[in-house]
C-alpha cells in the first residue's frame, strides 16, 4: 500500500491545500494530512481545532486521514509506513525553502521521496497567513477557504 503524507500547519486549511490533498488522494492508496503540533501565540486555531476542521473539510475523500505529529516529519512517516511527502508549490518563491526541506528530509531518510504538485493557478496567491490577515482586518475571504472554515474564521474575529 502506497501511503503519502501531506504535512503542514493548516492554520487555517485553504482551498489551495484542499486542491493538493484531493489530487494526492487520486495518486496514492492512502493520504495522511498531518498537522504539525506547533501551536504558537499567533495561531488562529488550536491543533485540536485544526484537526477537526480538516476532518470535516476532507470528509468527502475516502482515502484521507487526518492526524498530528509532534517532532520530525520523517520519524512520523516511518511510524506510519509512509514513503512519500506531498507538498504544493505555488510560485518560484516557495521553491528555495521547499527544496531545502526536501533535501534535508532526504539526507535524514533517503528512502522517503518528496513529491511537489503545482498548485492550481486559481489558488497560487493563497496562503494561510494572508487569509488570517485579511480576515483579521475585516476583508472578504470568500472562495479562499472551504465554506465551513470561513464561518469558523468569521466567528473567531466577530
Ligand atoms: O504549512 P507549513 O507551515 O509550511 O508546513 C511546514 C512543515 C510542517 C511541513 C515543516 O515545518 C515540517 O515538516 N516540520 C516538521 C519538523 C521537521 O521535520 N523538520 C525538518 C524538515 S526539514
Image: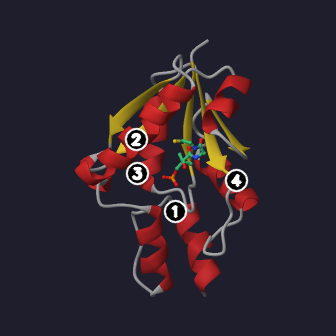
Q: Do labels 1 and 3 touch, CB within 8 Å?
A: no
List the residue tagged with mark 2: 100
Decide which of 158, 86 is in the foreground and name it. Answer: 86
List the residue tagged with mark 4: 37
In 3D space, how far apart are the residues under numbered discs 3 and 4 (Cα atoms)?
A: 21 Å
Q: Secondary structure at mark 4?
A: loop
Q: Is residue 25 visible?
A: no
List the residue tagged with mark 3: 16
Above/below status of 129 relative to 57 = below
In 3D space, how far apart are the residues under numbered discs 2 and 3 (Cα atoms)?
A: 22 Å
Neighbours of disc 2 within 10 Å: few (<14), some (14-19), many (20+): few
Give the position of the C terminus as an image quadrant. Answer: bottom right
Q: Secondary structure at mark 1?
A: helix
Q: Nearer the viewer, mark 1 or mark 4?
A: 4
Q: Nearer the viewer, mark 4 or mark 2?
A: 2
Decide which of 13, 68 is in the foreground and name it. Answer: 68
Is the distance from the Cβ of mark 2 to the nearest ligand 1 atom less than 8 Å? yes
Q: Do labels 2 and 1 touch, CB within 8 Å?
A: no
Residue 119 image position (x, y, % from top left) = 32, 44
Q: Which mark is residue 21?
A: none
Amino acid at each position: 500500500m502506497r501511503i503519502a503524507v501531506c504535512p503542514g500547519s493548516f492554520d487555517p486549511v485553504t482551498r489551495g491545500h484542499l486542491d493538493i490533498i484531493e489530487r494526492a488522494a487520486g495518486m496514492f492508496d492512502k493520504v495522511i494530512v498531518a498537522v504539525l503540533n506547533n501551536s504558537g501565540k499567533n495561531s488562529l486555531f488550536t491543533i485540536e481545532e485544526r484537526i477537526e476542521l480538516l476532518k470535516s473539510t476532507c470528509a468527502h475523500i475516502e482515502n484521507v486521514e487526518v492526524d498530528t505529529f509532534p517532532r520530525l516529519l520523517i520519524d512520523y512517516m516511518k511510524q506510519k509506513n509512509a514513503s512519500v511527502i506531498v507538498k504544493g508549490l505555488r510560485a518560484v518563491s516557495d521553491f528555495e525553502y521547499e527544496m531545502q526541506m526536501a533535501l534535508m528530509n532526504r539526507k535524514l531518510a533517503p528512502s522517503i521521496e518528496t513529491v511537489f504538485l503545482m498548485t492550481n493557478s486559481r489558488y497560487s496567491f493563497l496562503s494561510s497567513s494572508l487569509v488570517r490577515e485579511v480576515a483579521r482586518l475585516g476583508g472578504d475571504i470568500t472562495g479562499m477557504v472551504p465554506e465551513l472554515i470561513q464561518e469558523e474564521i468569521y466567528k473567531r474575529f466577530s
